[in-house]
Amino acid sequence: MPRTSQPGRSVSSRLFEILYAFGPGRTRLTLAELTRVTCLPHATVRRLVLELVQAGALDRAADGTLTIGLRLWRLGTLAPLTVPLRTAAQPFMEDLYTALNQHVQLAVREGTEAVIVERLSASPAVDVVSQVGGHLPLHSSGVGKVLLAHAPEEIGERLLTAGLPRLTPRTITDPQRLRQVLVECRRTGIATVREETSTMADSVASRVMDADGNVVAALSVVVRSGTVDLRAVTPTVIASALGISRRLGWTPRAGVR
């Protein structure tokens, strides 16, 4: 293995660090920005970026800025969970979007965060902090609470031990209260939040299950606070999530795990 200037750091780990520097809001970076984000030596970043460009993992524009390359994007679309999930969810999300003209989003859990894997947005709808590929907190978002309620117990304990950031005045930061909310969410399969992640944004979310009854995703509708009765929207969101679950092979006999 090639030697690096930092003991214990492999070349592959540095390549991944450069790739992981890209994300929502950071889709186009310069060499200088990559050096600052990764904290790697400029010469190292320049050398590794050249290799990534030659391999097609990064694309370099005429002005020298860098973006994720088409070959790497194609590889990402082969992720075994998101491909069948997004395919199964698309018609149900489109129906929700058409009926409500509000944000509709689908999320999966990655560690202690929710990741948006698909979203349909209405231009007049409320501004939201999430976007495809972006992260949402588990403790304060609708999709996050659904995913957290059905996550392994150690995930919840890790989150509670680390502390619950207050994102708005209405964010639940008391561990005991959040535990009670999660118990109810586990029982019903739905979560309703009002201005907990961002002001003026409410949401209702429901669980999506696979053929074995495992909760693999959460579907939600996000609306401007006070404009939609979430109780009226909830049955439609539940029905859509169950429809996606059935397309993934779930049946009532499989139950929920």
Image (cartoon, rainbow, N blue to C red):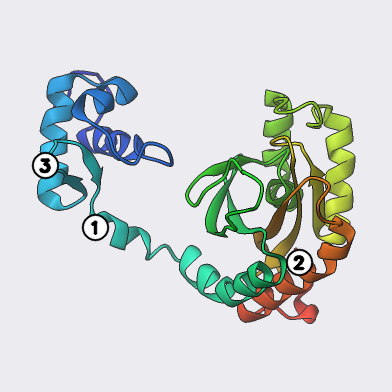
Q: 183 or 119, which is in the foreground? A: 119
Compared across the picture, whether 148 is left or right of 7 comes to: right
Label 1 crowd bin: few (<14), some (14–19), many (20+), radius 10 Å: few
Separation of disc 3 and disc 1 at Cα?
Answer: 16 Å
What mark, if any, has residue 136 been given in the picture?
Answer: none
Q: Name the spot of residue 231 as percent of width and height, x first.
A: 89, 59
Residues under numbered marks 3 and 2 in contact, where contact means CB atoms less than 8 Å apart: no
Q: Earlier in the sequence, mark 2 or mark 1?
A: 1
Vertical order, 87 against 125 (above or below): below
Residue that numbered label 3 is attached to: 62
Compared across the picture, whether 86 is left or right of 64 comes to: right
Q: Name the spot of residue 192 as percent of width and height, x first.
A: 82, 50
Vertical order, 17 against 254 (above or below): above
Which amino acid, by three-letter code, is at mark 3? Ala
Q: Secondary structure at mark 3?
A: loop
Q: Secondary structure at mark 2?
A: helix
Q: 112 or 194, which is in the foreground? A: 194
Vertical order, 150 against 234 (above or below): above
Residue that numbered label 2 is attached to: 237
Q: Residue at x 68, y 70 (%)?
A: 96
Compared across the picture, whether 52 is left or right of 118 comes to: left
Quadrant in the rendering for residue 205? bottom right
Residue that numbered label 1 is attached to: 70
- Whether residue 1 is visible, yes or no, is no
